Image (spheres, rainbow, N blue to C red):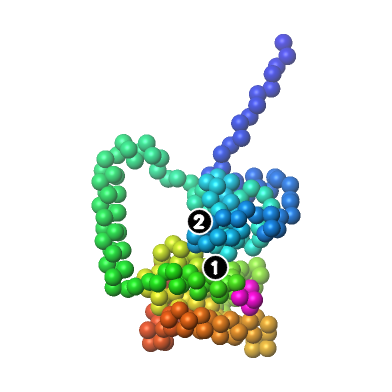
Amino acid sequence: EKAVPVKKSKPLFTTDAEADEINESREDKKITEKDLPVGKCSSCSEKGSLIKCDSCKKGQHLLCIYPPIRKIPSRKWFCHKCRQPNPTLPDEKAENPNLRRRSRRSLETEAGLSQSVARDLPLDNASLQELLDALMHHKDAWPFLRPVTRSEVPDYHNIIKRPMDFGTVKHKLNMLEYRNNSEVIADARLVFDNCFIYNQADTEIYQCGLRLQKAFEKLCKERSLSVSDDDIKYPESKRSRTVF
């Protein structure tokens, strides 16, 4: 009797590596921004061309995606949230009343802290989003939109101990990691400080930094976001870093 081959079911990915392996198996297609759907970005709520997650179907601007990607994906793409494995299943949460009570108390505590922070340390989110969008679409912003990688510039992190870029600033603002305007301004100024420390004055990137810094100061004044040097407060790092 002839044996019937058993069809193997496709495994569901739970890690970035598995997702990338699936992506690599698809044929390359050259996709431009004109091919993308237009709608409201799930990160910044602004309209524009969107890259949509193949899992949750939410769309984001290329500049809003975190971790940053350098070009429009030509294969299946999954957003950061959908690529994160879920450590706790819903059934486990339902069966554990202690976890429910603890979670409720945590949410109440966080809500109280958030209200206190909002009162004491105001954050003008709308103006800051406008500022960053205008800055990131400036013609001289291209060197400062993504983190500098070791593969691109091997000695960069040996010289710059507190790297920063505007893609990261925007992500932190979207994730509510800033407490006030001065922390956002501080990270933005850090981008320029790092530029002038690492690059020679006669290089293209240094000159881009100079022009973009002037545009940044002008945008701040237009939105009444100017902060004096004495008021600048750098956001607390999750781990200690050496200031260059």
Task: Please tell me whether residue 147 is drawn above or below residue 229 in the rendered image.
Answer: above
Q: Residue 194 placed where, x, y %?
A: 55, 80
Q: Residue at x 28, y 64 (%)?
A: 115
Three-letter code, disc 1? Gly
Above or below residue 123? Residue 47 is above
- The answer to whether mark 1 and mark 2 are in CB contact below 8 A is no
Q: Nearer the viewer, residue 84 or 79?
A: 79
Residue that protrudes farthest toward the top in the picture = 1
Task: Please provide percent x and percent y for residue 104.
Answer: 27, 49
Specify few, some or many for label 1: CA neighbours under 10 Å numbering under 14, 14-19, or 20 or more. many
Q: Residue 46 has which mark?
A: none
Tell me which residue sits at (40%, 43%) in the image: 88
Query: Which residue bears the numbered disc 2?
Result: 42
Residue 4 occupies quadrant: top right
Taking the spot 27% from the left edge, 67% from the top edge, the residue there is: 116
Q: Quarter of the image holding residue 178?
A: bottom left
Label 2 SS? loop
In this picture, which residue range is highlighted in magenta? 138-142
Number of marks in the rendered image: 2
Residue that label 1 marks: 167
Task: Give the residue type that dot 2 points to.
Answer: Ser
Taking the magenta stretch, the answer to whether it contains residue 88 is no
Query: Is 37 above or below relative to 220?
Result: above
Left or right: 108 in relation to 225: left
Q: CA distance from mark 1 to mark 2?
A: 15 Å
